[in-house]
Amino acid sequence: MTEESCNTLYPCTGNSARSIIAEAIMNREVMGKSKVWFAGSRPGPAPHPDTLDLPKSLNEDISLARSKCWDGFATPDAPQMISSSPSATTPPPQDARFALASR
């Protein structure tokens, strides 16, 4: 059986702390077979100053760590979106075309 890539977007609210850490760890775990992003409905201007300490101590690649808005993922080829937080899933912009995990 061949493995299929499953790029996934996890929406959150601020995208400046826990989600930055989770993104680094999850991307390490999928070992390039897929790509994982966390993006916020109201992202902060930058990661919280203390946020990057843990991934750095675990030798995670944080070179691209930044707070991201989910609007940047509203494209026809958007990754699937998975959320466990109702507060993070305020409806995306009207023109957003998120591929839903339920398909």
Image: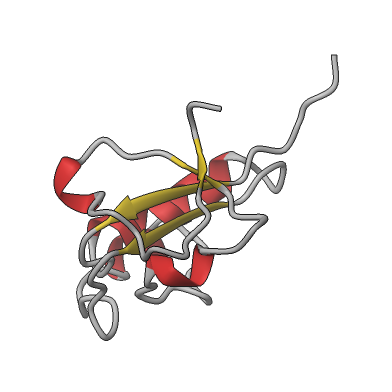
Q: Residue furthest front?
A: 94
Q: If the image is split into quadrants, where does the N terminus sit? A: top right
Question: Horizontal placement of 27 versus 43: left or right?
Answer: right
Question: Taking 71 as reference, is 31 above or below it?
Answer: above
In front of the other: 50 or 40: 40
How many numbered marks are there?
A: 0
Q: Residue furthest right?
A: 1
Task: Tell me where residue 76 sits by quadrant.
Answer: bottom right
Question: Horizontal placement of 66 versus 91: left or right?
Answer: right
Question: Residue 5, how many percent across, how many down?
Answer: 72, 38
In front of the other: 86 or 26: 86
Question: Residue 10, how many percent across, how many down?
Answer: 39, 48
Question: Taking 45 as reference, is 57 above or below it?
Answer: above
Q: Which residue is drawn at 48% across and 26% down?
A: 102
Coloration mode: secondary structure
In front of the other: 71 or 4: 71
Q: Which residue lies furthest to the bottom in this view?
A: 45
In front of the other: 27 or 59: 27
Q: Which residue is drawn at 67% across and 55% down?
A: 77
Question: Residue 24, how many percent across, how many down?
Answer: 46, 56
Question: Horizontal placement of 85 versus 62: left or right?
Answer: left
Q: If the image is split into quadrants, where does the C terminus sit? A: top right
Question: Residue 11, how many percent across, how many down?
Answer: 34, 52
Q: Residue at x 26, y 86 (%)?
A: 45
Q: Residue at x 14, y 49 (%)?
A: 87
Question: Horizontal placement of 63 versus 91: left or right?
Answer: right
Q: Residue furthest top?
A: 1
Task: Tell me where residue 34 sits by quadrant.
Answer: top right
